Amino acid sequence: MPEVKKRETAHKQRIVDLQRGNQIFETVEGNQRFKFLELGNKQLIRINLIANVIDKYVSDGERRFASITVDDGSGQIRARVFGEDFHKFDNLSQGDTIVIIGFLKSFNNELYILPEIIRKMDTKYLLIRKLEIEKSFQSFQQSQPKKQEIKVLRDEVIHLIKTAEEKEGIDKEEIILSLKTAEPQIISQEIQKLLDEGIIYEPRPGRVRYLG
């Protein structure tokens, strides 16, 4: 019996959160290819987004493609279709509220959506989705560890990275697997904070080194 490939979850996210994520690439036949978007402890490949269409572009030349720009009130992102999928944007106009389910892709470091499903929605669903995500975020915030626990975790992360200098760095996944005292999402957040503060750096996607 052939192996059944697991279908990736279509995560419900705000556009602003997608823009804050870390784009992870892999090398395939000598070329860099987008693998997933790292957001906390999530590895996003597919998303489920509700937003308003604010712009539409169609190129009906030799290489047919089209794009729409959508806005959910937190930010903007483009969705693109090519070739046989050209028709997916046929009935869309500026001002439409849509649900879009599709794969995240990246071109020239610009994150965009390759849509699988697009449906028009009543505008009220944009507010419903906003409240749904806010409720989920509040529940997550309530489960966050205390400041002292975070400080201890931060010190542990820095120690692991420092001691890995002789190996020219350590993979983020190895840090997460080594530390059993906190949730993977919390550890990923602390790693990202250290990157943002310039205490560590990423010589290549997914691997970090101590900078001090």
Image (spheres, rainbow, N blue to C red):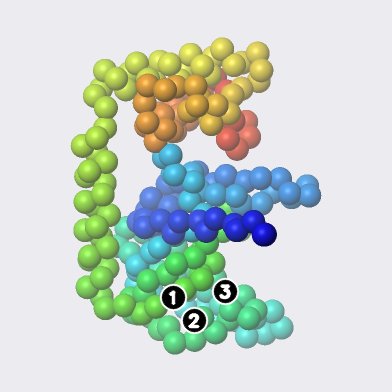
Q: Position of residue 167 (x, y in %)?
A: 66, 17
Circles 3, 2 touching at the beta carbon (< 8 Å): yes
Q: What label sits on residue 89 in the rendered view?
A: 2
> Looking at the picture, which amino acid does disc 2 mark?
Phe
Circles 2, 1 touching at the beta carbon (< 8 Å): yes
> Looking at the picture, which amino acid does disc 3 mark?
Val
Q: What label sits on residue 118 in the rendered view?
A: 1
The residue at which mark 3 appears reads as 81
Horizontal arrangement in the rendering, residue 65 relative to residue 22 (left or right): right
Q: Position of residue 66 (x, y in %)?
A: 56, 77
Q: Position of residue 203 (x, y in %)?
A: 62, 31
Is disc 1 surrounded by few (<14), some (14 to 19) or many (20+) residues within 10 Å? some
Is residue 212 in view? Answer: no
Mark 3–mark 1 distance (CA, rounded to whole Å): 12 Å
| Residue at 56% in and 12% down | 163
Q: Quadrant of residue 114?
A: bottom right
Q: Position of residue 29 (x, y in %)?
A: 78, 49
Mark 3–mark 2 distance (CA, rounded to whole Å): 8 Å
> Quadrant location of the N terminus?
bottom right
Q: What label sits on residue 169 in the rendered view?
A: none
Mark closer to the chain start, 3 or 1 = 3
